[in-house]
Amino acid sequence: MEGKRDRPEGRETFGRPRRRLIASSVAVLTLWGSAAFADPEPQTISGVPQQIVPMVGEVGLSAFTMPTGTVSILGGSTTGTGGLSGTGTSTDSSALDTMLGTSWGASAQQSSEALGVNASALAATCVVESNCQNVSGTGSITGAFQMTAATYQSSLAAALAQDPSLAANIVPGLAGQSDPATQAIAAAEYLKQGAQYLQNNGVSTPTALDVRGYYNFGPQGGAAIATAQDSDPISGALSMYTPAQLAKNGITAGETVGQWRSSVAAKMGSAAGAPVLT
């Protein structure tokens, strides 16, 4: 996923880690290159929880599977059935309700709206990525929005440049990647960039479903999927990737763009049709 790829690379409430309030966005940029601090302590579930089975892995990164026996959950525990990398579930219009049901959901909604991003589209993304759970992934991929460290940092910096007041509510440094409210700011900015990219490529009002391809496969793949016909093979829209890469991302031989859209929309619920930009 583009949000997760470099990234480009969606149940229960988790407590938010202690935040460090900083005076200005200048302080954020000063701390950017320093070591992470105020990092939340991972909590380990004993026994064998319901396993998360990724279906859409990271293009450009090796595929991964969740370990058996124990699962590391950041900030709390879960017994839900959603998963990483596009295996979350949704029931019709509940995506925003799911996000708002977390301790950080209201903050995420406020931040996304400050950036001009529809909170329902943001919620649809975290539902697909993790069912809005603050879970660890693989490598640098982590959090409710499953972003890589590189995409998280660049997107957060862009968001703070647009609205410096958001800096007052973040966990600074790379530790913020594991804080859902902070990562939500970066994810909202990345969705905004994706929607604007699609607008420049002929999609007048990009929805959460339209931008999903951008979040998964980056600008080129995202635009190709968003402008393809339902009957087109998705391998054609994603011709920049090998069959092996597509297979690692859960895309089967002969799968159409329409089938992929239907699968994603089923996870997002009615939020799939939510416009990304407000």
Image (cartoon, rainbow, N blue to C red):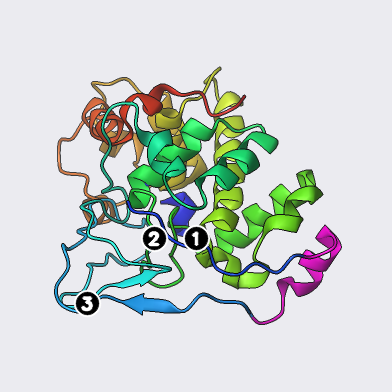
Q: Quadrant of residue 236?
A: top left
* Dot 3 or dot 2, earlier in sequence: 2
Residue visible at 53% across and 29% down?
A: 276
Q: Is residue 19 above or below residue 80?
A: below
Residue 90 image position (x, y, % from top left) = 28, 37
Label 2 to label 1: alpha-carbon separation: 8 Å
**Percent x, y of residue 130:** 34, 52
Q: Residue at x 60, y 70 (%)?
A: 18
Relative side of 114 to 258, left or right: right
* Horizontal side of residue 229 vs 156, given as left or right: left
Q: Nearer the viewer, residue 49 or 32?
A: 49
Asked if residue 41 lies left or right of residue 111, the reply is left
Q: Secondary structure at mark 2?
A: loop
What separation in Å lies between label 3 and label 2 (alpha carbons)? Answer: 27 Å
Mark 1 sits on what residue? 6
The label shown at residue 70 is 3
- Residue 60 circle label: 2
Which of the two marks, 1 or 3, is nearer to us in this view? Answer: 3
Magenta region: which residues? 22-35
> In this orientation, which residue lies closer to the viewer: 103 or 86?
103
**Residue 97 shown in magenta:** no
